[in-house]
Amino acid sequence: MTDQNMSLLRGTLDLLILKALSLGPLHGLGVSQRIDQITKGTFVVKPGSLFPALHRLEEKGWLKGSWGESTNNRRAKYYNVTKAGLAQLKTEQENWERVSVAVARMLEAI
């Protein structure tokens, strides 16, 4: 752990990105800011992790990107979750809930 921020578990980044974008379209840095805001700083996604993940999710067909203008008049790529992305989000959420329940049970038993 660095600066009291938890490191992302493998696969968690996809879940966080899909959930953030299910709330509405955002450009890349907006996704990072939304994740930081919703998790109250627990997860800070840096550009070096975020942008490759956005491209990967777009290649899988879970996101659709289109170019537009950001609030500071710069060209930015905005992402939307596709129908396939929403289905994947549901799957990811179910998997995460299963894992978190199992971990909670384990911690209670010890």
Image (spheres, grey):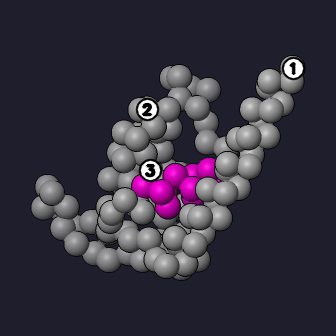
Q: Position of residue 4 (x, y in %)?
A: 53, 22
Task: Give neighbour class at mark 3: few <14, some 14-19, many 20+ (Cα, 10 Å).
Answer: few
Q: Label 3 vs label 2: CA separation?
A: 16 Å
Q: Which mark is residue 110?
A: 1
Identify the amino acid type marked 2.
Answer: Gly
**Residue 79 marker:** none
Residue type indicated by callout 3: Pro
What is the secondary structure assignment of the residue under circle 2? loop
Residue 17 included in the magenta stretch of the image: yes
Residue 79 locus on image (x, y percent)? 37, 69
Secondary structure at numbered mark 1: loop
- Compared with residue 86, is residue 52 higher up or lower down, i.e. above or below? above
Region rendered in magenta = 10-20
Q: Earlier in the sequence, mark 3 or mark 1?
A: 3
Cα separation, mark 1 vs mark 2, equals 29 Å
Q: Quickly name the residue at label 3.
A: 47
